[in-house]
Image (tube, rainbow, N blue to C red):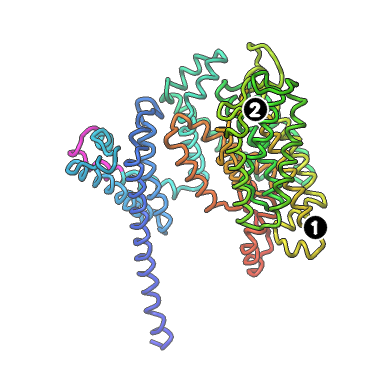
């Protein structure tokens, strides 16, 4: 044997053994993490509370879905460490087993020690649910479930994409439709489709037939789309032809947006009206934060100025001053909010970074305290607020336009106008100046940009649009109280801009839909909806930091390293992670 062969043989042996050891260590770690998640879901109350809600009537509950999901996901992640189907199934089963054993341990320990001293949800009812009613004698059941679900998830992960994708999408569709069964059932009943509703839904979940129908429709639709190759055909079309196809697609989307209140029930109409209102405010902050990079945590102050201005000018109650129509008060709301923005902006816009956020946060709290204080009680009503603010359009109570649909269309119309203004500004000279300031203030000043003047313009415009949002809010609710002015309004609007994609107009709209609309639909789980909200935000920042629909500049900034590595490797194909705005 040559010296080269002697030197190489141990390395080959090492490469056969060491990766398997590392892989199994990762599998054990994944299983332990899954076990910790399963215990958390049980002890925090998610599994027992959600167990009261049927997903598929008589078959599975939401609590079981949460528990089974915590067992299946470790198996799917563990299978990624395998190179063969046999190893994938084995690793998935082991990861699921470890997760299941954690739940088994909870049942065993809970039967001996009263865990309710520390965990209120560690009750006999929970243990009975985890063991299918068998109590301590069925403590082995979670471990067996973990093995089966882990192996099943690992097996699904090894399927070809043409099979795996329809299956996963079908299961997710059943989960989503079953989760919102109560909300989807109401529009069907109001539309006179009671027979269809009876086939698909029970009072609190899907029927078995409904689940099969939803799963089948989604799976078949995905298979047909794969066979036809719609995405590939569209990608192969010339640019001019693709531009032509966008017109009917956009027209269809606009039509759907316009008829949403007609298709959905009153609860959905209220939710989408709130989403439209936040879209309007987020478009304003998108100028301040998304383009100019000025983190304004006192955004709610300008919102309050606009709302109180409309209240004072239009209210027919005690604190109303002028009793003028809503539409005449809106320009004053924007004007006063812009003036307040200028008053605040002049002394603090020389501050940078976190200090600017702290200063604006303080201003927002000052406005909130003043609105509820005795100092302005004769003017603003203090804690009693201002009531009897009329709707923008006075119509009969039986009219479709009398409810939240009226505010939905008004907020949507204002949002379109604000989006158009923001789009024109972003593509103009002032927009490029804002972006330059956001990237590096020193360099921007060096090339001749007046920092204070340019930043003040962004701040005043953002404040004016926040005042417009406050005016629409006052018309939606019909009153304004100091309790409506809280920090969470500013945080929600800032989160919409960041999660949607800073500087991206379509991204802001999607951000409002995901961060405002979806949590509102989970109001039946009020104790836990903000837990899922926070988890979604963390996941977003970890896996898609550029946002749901990032602007081209943000995408290039966050993936500059990826692009440079591709170029160094000799591949000049552009990185397509994320969409261009």
Marker disc for residue 450? 1
For image coordinates 75% across by 64% down, the residue present is 443
Q: Is residue 106 visible?
A: yes
Residue 142 lies within the magenta run = yes
Q: Main secondary structure of the magenta part?
A: helix
Residue 343 lies within the magenta run = no
Residue for badge 2: 474
**Kind of element beneath mark 2:** helix
Q: x and y percent of residue 459 in the render?
A: 72, 47
Q: x and y percent of residue 34 in the render?
A: 36, 50
Which residue is at the front of the view, 105 or 529?
A: 529
Res 43 → quadrant: top left
Which residue is at the front of the view, 186 or 155?
A: 186
For image coordinates 40% across by 58% down, the residue present is 82
Q: Pick whichever of labels 1 and 2 is earlier in the sequence.
A: 1
For image coordinates 68% across by 58% down, the residue present is 574
For image coordinates 33% across by 34% down, the residue present is 48
Q: Which residues are magenta?
A: 133-145
CA distance separating discs 1 and 2: 36 Å
Res 260 → quadrant: top right
């Amino acid at each position: 044997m040559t010296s080269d062969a002697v030197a190489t043989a141990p390395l080959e042996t090492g490469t056969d053994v060491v990766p398997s050891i590392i892989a199994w260590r990762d599998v054990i770690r994944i299983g332990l993490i899954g076990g910790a998640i399963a215990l958390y879901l049980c002890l925090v109350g998610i599994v027992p509370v959600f167990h009261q809600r049927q997903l598929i009537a008589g078959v599975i509950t939401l609590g079981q879905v949460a528990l089974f999901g915590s067992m299946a996901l470790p198996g799917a992640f563990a299978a990624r460490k395998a190179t063969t189907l046999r190893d994938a199934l084995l690793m998935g089963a082991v990861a699921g087993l470890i997760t299941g054993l954690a739940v088994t341990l909870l049942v065993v320990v809970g039967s001996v020690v009263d865990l309710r001293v520390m965990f209120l949800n560690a009750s006999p009812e929970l243990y009975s649910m985890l063991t299918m009613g068998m109590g301590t004698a069925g403590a082995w059941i979670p471990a067996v479930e973990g093995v089966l679900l882990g192996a099943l998830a690992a097996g699904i992960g090894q399927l070809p994409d043409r099979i795996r994708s329809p299956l996963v999408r079908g299961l997710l569709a059943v989960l989503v439709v079953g989760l919102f069964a109560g909300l989807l059932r109401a529009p069907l009943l109001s539309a006179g489709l009671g027979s269809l509703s009876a086939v698909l839904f029970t009072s609190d979940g899907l029927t078995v037939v409904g689940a099969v129908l939803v799963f089948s429709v989604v799976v078949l639709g995905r298979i047909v789309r794969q066979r036809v190759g719609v995405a590939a055909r569209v990608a192969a079309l010339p640019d001019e032809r693709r531009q032509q196809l966008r017109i009917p697609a956009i027209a269809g989307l606009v039509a759907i947006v316009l008829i949403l209140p007609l298709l959905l029930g009153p609860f959905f109409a209220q939710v989408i009206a709130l989403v439209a209102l936040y879209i309007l405010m987020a478009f304003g902050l998108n100028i301040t934060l998304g383009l100019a990079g000025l983190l304004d945590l006192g955004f709610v102050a300008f919102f309050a100025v606009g709302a109180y201005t409309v209240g004072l000018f239009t209210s027919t109650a005690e604190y109303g001053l002028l009793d003028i129509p809503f539409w005449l008060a809106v320009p004053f709301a924007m004007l006063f909010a812009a003036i307040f923005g200028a008053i605040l902006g002049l002394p603090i816009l020389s501050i940078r970074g976190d200090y600017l956020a702290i200063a604006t946060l303080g201003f927002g709290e000052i406005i909130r305290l003043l609105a509820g204080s005795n100092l302005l009680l004769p003017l603003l009503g203090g804690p009693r607020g201002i009531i009897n603010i009329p709707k923008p359009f006075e119509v009969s109570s039986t009219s479709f336009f009398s409810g939240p649909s009226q505010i939905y269309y008004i907020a949507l119309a204002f949002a379109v106008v604000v989006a158009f203004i923001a789009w024109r500004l972003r593509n103009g000279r002032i927009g490029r100046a804002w972006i330059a300031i956001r990237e590096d203030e020193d360099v921007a000043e060096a090339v001749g940009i007046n920092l204070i003047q340019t930043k003040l313009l962004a701040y005043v415009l953002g404040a004016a649009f926040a005042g417009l949002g406050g005016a629409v809010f006052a018309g939606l609710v019909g009153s304004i109280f100091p309790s409506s002015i809280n920090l969470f309004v500013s945080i929600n609007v800032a989160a919409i801009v960041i999660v949607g994609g800073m500087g991206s107009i379509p991204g802001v709209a999607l951000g409002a839909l995901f961060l405002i609309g979806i949590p509102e639909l989970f109001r039946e789980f009020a104790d836990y909806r903000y837990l899922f909200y926070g988890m979604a935000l963390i996941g977003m920042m970890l896996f898609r930091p550029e946002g749901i629909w990032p602007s081209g500049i943000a995408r290039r900034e966050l993936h500059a390293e990826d692009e440079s590595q591709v170029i160094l490797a000799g591949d000049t194909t552009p990185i397509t992670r994320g969409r261009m705005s």
